Image: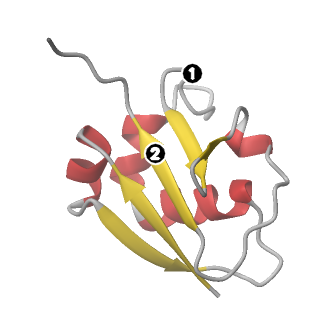
Amino acid sequence: MNVTWRLFATLGEAAGDNEVTLEVPAEATVADTLETLFAQYPAVAEEARDEDGSVYEHVRTLHEGEDVDEPLDSDRAIADGDELALFPPVSGG
């Protein structure tokens, strides 16, 4: 099945695109799709992960518009066509 990741700011720059579609197994979870994203786009992993391999606390992960608190530990099921998003911290004025 296919899922779409929307990548914002520096994460999109790291991937070379603000939106990427990935093929994942039918039984994939949020954690599985995030690992697939990181495997296919190592520069995104470098931007989003700390030295221990955890996703930085300040990087928000969303699945179908809902926050995912612990994305690498999330067993939330993914369906074909779902949309996920990664947001780095944003500031401005």
**Residue 33: horizontal and vertical position, in percent?**
63, 64
Say left or right for 73 vs 7: right
**Disc ID at residue 86:** 2
As drawn, 87 above or below 44 = above
The residue under label 1 is 57
Q: Residues within 10 Å of mark 2 (few under 14, many from 20)?
A: many
Q: Residue furthest bottom?
A: 1
Q: Which quarter of the rendered picture does the N terminus lie within?
A: bottom right
Q: Which quarter of the rendered picture does the C terminus lie within?
A: top left
Report the amino acid beneath label 2.
Leu
Spatial CA distance of label 1 from label 2 is 12 Å
Say left or right for 45 vs 19: right
The residue drawn where x is 58% and y is 80% is 81
**Residue 79: horizontal and vertical position, in percent?**
72, 76
Q: Considering depth in this image, is 54 or 84 the residue closer to the camera? A: 84
Report the amino acid beneath label 1.
Glu
* Label 1 element class: loop
Say left or right for 6 vs 12: right
